Amino acid sequence: MSMSNEEILVPNPARSGKNSRAHFGGTHPRGPIIDQDGREIPEASLGSQFQGFGSDDFRSEGFRFDGFRFDFGGANPFRNLTREQRLARLDAIAKLLDIAFILPGTKIRYGVDGIIGLIPVVGDLIAAALSLWLVREARALGAPWHITARMLGNVAIQGVVGAVPVAGDAFDVLFRANIRNVRMLRRWMDKQAR
């Protein structure tokens, strides 16, 4: 089952609610603050890091490639984040890995994963490691075993087929395992919020 560029770039409003957007407004993070291992951090132990939020402290930080913006939801990607901010970070990284660039003269999108995969063996290992990190982050966000198993299956399919020279690289560009995995995680998290 392949996804069109429109399905990837424009979320389906029927399936996603207000909390599923990658951009989070407001001056204060919503929800509990969690560390890199998914454990909640009590507000009392946060110190001055989260005291006195202003619009300058919580401004949008992200990357821009070829007119495509990767927004981390106003969060520094290396400090303790809320669940929403971590999901926005995963979304931005998945887009960077899978759909950051457009092949000139076509509508085919590819990402850093497709470029790295062109390096024989080592490139495929690096791409698989990046994809596995996304699965690890999903597990830290509380994703159950059946979601992480499906995510690992997508990574395995991409890794095995991607190891085939040329045809595997084309498959990587079209399969977009990272986008699929983050979308699957987001759907699961949207159901939990209700």
Image (spheres, helix red, strand yellow):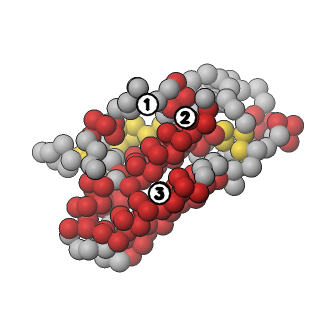
**Image location of residue 124, percent across then percent down:** 37, 71
Amino acid type indicated by mark 2:
Asp
Q: Which mark is residue 85?
A: none
Please rate how many residues cluster around mark 1, counting C-alpha atoms within 10 Å: few if below 14, some from 14 to 19, many from 20. Answer: few
Q: Is residue 115 left or right of residue 50?
A: left
Please rate how many residues cluster around mark 3, counting C-alpha atoms within 10 Å: few if below 14, some from 14 to 19, many from 20. Answer: some
* Residue that appears at 54% across and 42% down: 188
The tally of labels here is 3
Q: Which mark is residue 190?
A: 2
Displayed quadrant of residue 51: top right
Residue at image mark 1: 15
131 to 69, vertically: above or below: below
Q: Is residue 164 left or right of residue 53?
A: left
Q: Nearer the viewer, residue 11 or 113?
A: 11
- Distance between the alpha carbons at the discs numbered 2 and 3: 17 Å
Residue at image mark 3: 150
User: Is there any visible trace of residue 26 in the rendered image?
Assistant: yes
**Image location of residue 177, percent across then percent down:** 38, 55
In terms of sequence position, does the residue under pointer 3 or pointer 1 come before the other?
A: 1
* Residue that appears at 54% across and 55% down: 146
Q: Are marks 3 and 1 in contact (CB under 8 Å)?
A: no
Q: Are marks 1 and 2 in contact (CB under 8 Å)?
A: yes
Quarter that holds the C terminus:
top right
Displayed quadrant of residue 119: bottom left
Displayed quadrant of residue 31: top right
- Distance between the alpha carbons at the discs numbered 1 and 2: 9 Å
Q: Secondary structure at mark 2?
A: helix
In terms of sequence position, does the residue under pointer 1 or pointer 2 come before the other?
A: 1
Q: Nearer the viewer, residue 11 or 165?
A: 11
